[in-house]
Amino acid sequence: MRFQTPLTTFEFVMRNALLPIFLTAALSGCAMGSGELADVDPGAAPDTPTWTEHVEPVVNFYCRGCHSKDAQPGAQEDVAYDSCAETKREWGEFRETVFDENSMPPGGADRLRPWELMMLARWWEQGGTCD
């Protein structure tokens, strides 16, 4: 028969009180897409974002799984972000669902982080050029 050594007071407190509090705080308050755009450090996003280097990788990661001509079955076939021109053409819908309603990406999918939103907004405000 194997005996366990009793917990020290520190171990007991950490295991039964503080650790669950720390984990809850860390996991609930640090969601990737939480925060307000106005609270983002302006230096977190590039000053002059480009389609190829900055915008397209974000669109590819968050959007093209459903919004692409080659998307998974059952995806949104009427809205595609396969190119810069298509993304610009659909910008009104993109802005409404991503920025205003915060409904995209849907469900439990990762949301765009505040600095990514700032970068997309800067790209559009600077003319949304396709390079």
Image (tube, rainbow, N blue to C red):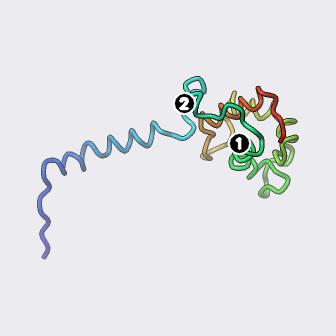
Percent x, y of residue 20: 32, 45
Instruction: Pick whichever of labels 1 and 2 is earlier in the sequence.
Output: 2
* Image quadrant occupied by the N terminus: bottom left
Q: Mark 2 — residue?
A: 35
Percent x, y of residue 118: 65, 31
* Image quadrant occupied by the C terminus: top right
Q: Is residue 114 left or right of residue 96?
A: left
Percent x, y of residue 85: 88, 40
Q: Mark 1 — residue?
A: 54
Q: Is residue 8 above or below residue 1?
A: above
Q: Is residue 11 left or right of residue 106?
A: left
Q: Which of the pair 108/40 is nearer the observer?
A: 40
**Label 2: which secondary element:** loop
Give the Cα distance between marks 1 and 2. Answer: 21 Å
Q: What amino acid does circle 1 point to?
A: His
Q: Is residue 57 left or right of residue 39?
A: right
Q: Is residue 5 above or below residue 42?
A: below
Q: Is residue 13 above or below residue 72?
A: above
